[in-house]
Every structure is written in C-alpha cells, then in structure tokens.
Image: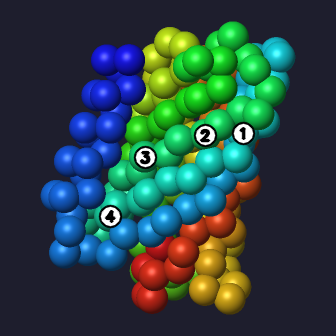
Amino acid sequence: MKRARLLGALAIFFVHSSAAQSQQVELRGDVLGPRPYSAQPGVGLIVPLGYYVRASSDVGYAPSANTGLIDEHWRGDLLARFTLDPFREERWGFSIGGGLSLRRHMYLAAIIDLEGPETHGVLPALQVGLSGGVRAAFIVRRAVKGRR
C-alpha cells in the first residue's frame, strides 16, 4: 500500500509542476506477461516536462484475478519517455523511455512507443516494453495542437 501511495504522490507532483502546459488523457488496453497473461483496460495522464520529455501515470484493472497484481486486479505505472518528434512534424512519432511499474511487486520498466497521426482529435499509439515480463498496449491519447 505504501508503494501505491508513493506512485500517487509522484503523479500529483508531476501534474502540479506542469500546470502551465497542456496535459493529455489516455485510454489504454494493456497485455502484461509473464504467464498467465493479464489483459487490462486502463486510464492515464500525461504531463509534458519540457519539449521532449513526457511523464505519465496510469492505472489498469484486470477483470480476471491474477496473483501477480495488487489485490489480484490492479496495476500502476509511472513512466517518462523521450519523444523524437515533439512538435508532430512527421506523421508518425517515436519515443523511448522507462520508469516504474507497480503490481504485486515494483518493477523497472523500459518502453518504446510509436504514435500515429491525429484522427478526430485523438492520437493512437502502440507501446511495447519490459517490466517484470513483456508488456504491450494500444493507447488512444487526446491530441494537443502542435505537439505530441
């Protein structure tokens, strides 16, 4: 429970430290390994930390119980990623990053993220990585004019 509070406090810090910049909300569909794999819908908040870095916190809920998760259902992430195209000058944007993933235990996470072109005010993205096993996500983020 202390780890969950720490993740929450860090997320609040990131939100308040970047209040002048536009934040993005994201909806996620994650699949986490190792076996048994866990499929989790989730939500997140992205805060820009300058032009190139994005900090995010998200939470996922697994409908099927999994003993590797908090209370067998919950997971939280606190991630930062470096984007190579912060102003959406290209159709597709690539970013790399890492952070912490909290399940039953805390894991280091390494991710790569490929964000697609804006469609109807949202940016679709695919994210893959490692954190206590493999992870993959399909993400839909709110588009912010002129930046990723």
Crowding at mark 3 (Cα within 10 Å: few <14, some 14-19, many 20+): many
Q: What residue does disc 3 label?
A: 57
Residue 143: image location, x then y, percent: 53, 79
> Between marks 2 and 4, how big is the CA–CA gap?
21 Å
Q: Dividing the picture into quarters, in which one does residue 69 lie?
A: top right
Q: Amino acid at mark 3?
A: Ser
Q: Where is residue 112 shown, x and y percent of the image?
A: 59, 46
Question: Vertical placement of 128 versus 38: above or below?
Answer: below
Numbered mark located on residue 40 in the image:
1
Q: Secondary structure at mark 4?
A: strand
| Label 1 or label 4, whichever comes before in sequence order | 1
Circles 1, 2 touching at the beta carbon (< 8 Å): yes
How many marks are shown on the rendered structure? Answer: 4
Estimate how packed mark 2 is, as few (under 14), some (14 to 19) or many (20 or more) residues with alpha carbons within 10 Å. many
Is there CB contact under 8 Å for labels 2 and 4? Answer: no
Label 1 vs label 3: CA separation? 15 Å
Residue at point 75%, 20% (across, down): 65
Residue drawn at x 16%, y 58% as measured from the top left: 17
Residue at 38% x, 26% y is 4
The location of residue 127, given as percent across then percent down, is 66, 49
- Labels 4 and 3: the sequence-earlier one: 4
In three-dimensional space, the C-alpha distance between marks 1 and 4, rounded to whole angstroms, equals 25 Å
Determine the CA span between mark 1 and mark 2: 5 Å
